[in-house]
Amino acid sequence: MIEMRSDTFTLPTAAMITAMASAELGDDVYGEDPTVRRLEEEAAALVGKESACLMPSGTMANLCALLAQAPRGTKAVVGNESDIYLYEAGGAAVCGGVVYAPVATRPNGELALADLDAEFPDEPEDPQFALPAVVCVENTHNRCGGRVLAKDYLDELRHFADARRVALHLDGARLFNAAVASGRSAADIAAVADTVQFCLSKGLGAPVGSILAGSHDVLVRARRLRKMLGGGMRQAGVLAAAGRLALTTMTDRLAEDHEHARRLAEGLADIPGVLIGLETVETNIVLFRIAPERMGWQRFVDEVGEQGLAVAGFGHDRVRAVTHHGIGAAEVDRAIGVVARVLAR
């Protein structure tokens, strides 16, 4: 099976498995796992933050960031196409009484500043209004096809947050894809944000784990929230060992995934019945549609699956294919062939 449903299907490298088996361990809830501590120190330095905390998942990392910065009854302003809003089970509302305020997402992943501003009441002292406490953006933007937010936009967003005295959280699940695609460092991209989360899994290949980074004070609160949510892990150095290798050996190679995504997109564009905008393919995510007169997206997904290609429906009648370190040029070419054969029937 050519697995392109998501880069979450990556498997740890042989070096990661070896490191996991020999990791130096302790009890991380007590702050005594040396491998976790080294990972957190290295991760914080890599994104230019004071402190970092290993989380079991990106969902928990985002949730802890929101709850640590948004008091109960305040608003988290999010994109209506963001992972936080669509795919994380409403955690901030359920667990913290934080109101999600979704605003329209532009095709490139940006949230228009005018739309963000509309979430701030003209009379902030009026007790009827829930006040925004945190603005959340996503880079790269998953539902927009792995788009990278521009530096100028992020700088404007930082000024916006400062002027309104709210926190800015960056959901950087694929932060290093954004770094590689833009030629900027992860620290440079994350500098605009008060908090940032990024996944050690997905394209970086670790089996489990995400990092939340920010100021020392916010991370103290986030660590307590992690424990409350059931994310306190004991000998977590087993996971942290793989995470350290993810950060030292797997970030630069993301360029290969981007090249393979471009190869896939260009091949799909030549197939009658595939509708795709090549200009939208910036990283490792390829979104496309099937011409409705050919077949519906569900039938397409089912039929290519029967031919050995796993892709996924992705809303708005779209199909998503994601490249990762388990997918090489040969697999990409085979995938193109499968699509061509299915649509030629």
Image: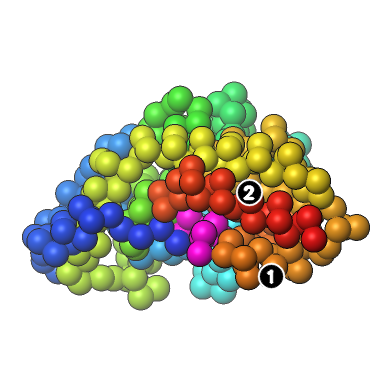
State the residue in front, 183 or 342: 342
* Residue 71 seen in render: no
The mark lying in front, picked from 1 and 2, is: 2
Dot 1 surroundings within 10 Å: few (below 14), some, or many (20 or more)?
A: some
| Viewer can see residue 274 | yes
Residue depicted at x 44% and y 35%: 255
Q: Position of residue 61 (x, y in %)?
A: 42, 58
In magenta, the rendered stretch is 1-8
At x 56%, y 51%, the residue is: 334
Which secondary structure, mark 1?
helix
In this picture, residue 128 sits left or right of residue 146: right
Q: Is residue 298 above or below residue 125?
A: below
Q: Is residue 316 above or below residue 279?
A: below
| Residue 164, x across and y down, in percent | 61, 38
Is residue 37 shown above or below 49? below
Mark 2 highlights which residue? Answer: 336
